[in-house]
Amino acid sequence: EAAVTQSPRSKVAVTGGKVTLSCHQTNNHDYMYWYRQDTGHGLRLIHYSYVADSTEKGDIPDGYKASRPSQENFSLILELASLSQTAVYFCASMGPEVFFGKGTRLTVV
Amino acid sequence: GDSVTQTEGQVTVSESKSLIINCTYSATSIAYPNLFWYVRYPGEGLQLLLKVITAGQKGSSRGFEATYNKETTSFHLQKASVQESDSAVYYCALSDRTGFASALTFGSGTKVIVLP
């Protein structure tokens, strides 16, 4: 069964700290995406990747880095977390169909 | 850029009543984008509910329907008789046709609460 697994599911981070959100897919998809969702907004694209060891900037990449060490894994990195990065983050893998993870709720305090 | 607008942030409806969720889109990158409805049940990730890639066509799934209207650039989601299990957040989305793996542009979502 196709799956996208995000970890952690919830995290509280301190302002200025480093945060890493992880995503693992078993769908054999080349494309993976990171979105964030804020209340009252749709999901917005942060970074994406279409092949291992390569990442691309999405619509709102500032303050985020991404890493794709393998086809299965795609991480989102906040080097210096800020209050404005409090949001729910979704990872997705795309082939003919799109599969989303359950989301990571990040609270920066 | 492309955009999707959902005007209702939350809709409350009684079980067995009809539901309509409005969605309009603006696609600058392509004339006829692919259109989708996704649903997120509590504690779950987004799931594809239905998609339509041809203007004028209707998609349906789980009792929900949506028609791709290129004249009004709309893709409203409807259900004739909702159930409590339909309580969820619904997202309208579009993608261009540059490839099946092109990124999605989402609306802000509509939370549907179905009262027993």
Image (tube, coloured by chain):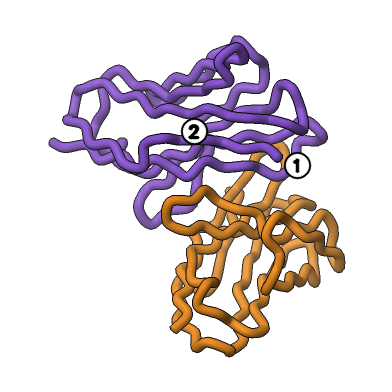
Chain colours: A orange, B purple
Q: Are marks 2 and 1 on the same chain?
A: yes
The outermost residue toward the left is B116
Mark carried by residue A86: none
The residue pinned by badge 2 equals B49
Decide which of B111, A25 is in the foreground and name it: B111
Total numbered labels: 2
Where residue B99 sits: x, y (%)? 80, 35
**Residues at marks 2 and 1 touching, judged by CB atoms closer than 8 Å:** no
Neighbourhood count class around disc 1 (C-alpha, 10 Å): few under 14, some 14–19, many 20 upward: many
Where residue B56 sits: x, y (%)? 60, 10
User: Dot 2 falls on which chain?
Assistant: B
Which residue does the image show at 43% across and 46% down from the upper left?
Answer: B40
Element under disc 2 = strand
**Rendering quarter of residue A90:** bottom right
Decide which of A78, A31 is in the foreground and name it: A78
Element under disc 1 = loop
Quadrant of the image containing the N terminus of chain B: top right
The residue pinned by badge 1 equals B101
Which residue does the image show at 77% across and 60% down from the upper left?
Answer: A57
Residue B102 placement, left or right of A11: right
Identify residue type, mark 2.
Answer: Leu
Residue A43 placement, left or right of A95: left
Which residue does the image show at 61% across and 59% down from the upper left?
Answer: A91
- A68 w.r.t. B73: above or below: below
Which residue does the image show at 38% across and 47% down from the upper left?
Answer: B41
Residue A41 placement, left or right of A46: left
Lower sequence index among marks 2 and 1: 2
**Rendering quarter of residue B78:** top left
Where residue B85 sits: x, y (%)? 27, 38
Q: CA distance from mark 2 to mark 1?
A: 18 Å
Where residue B57 sits: x, y (%)? 59, 12
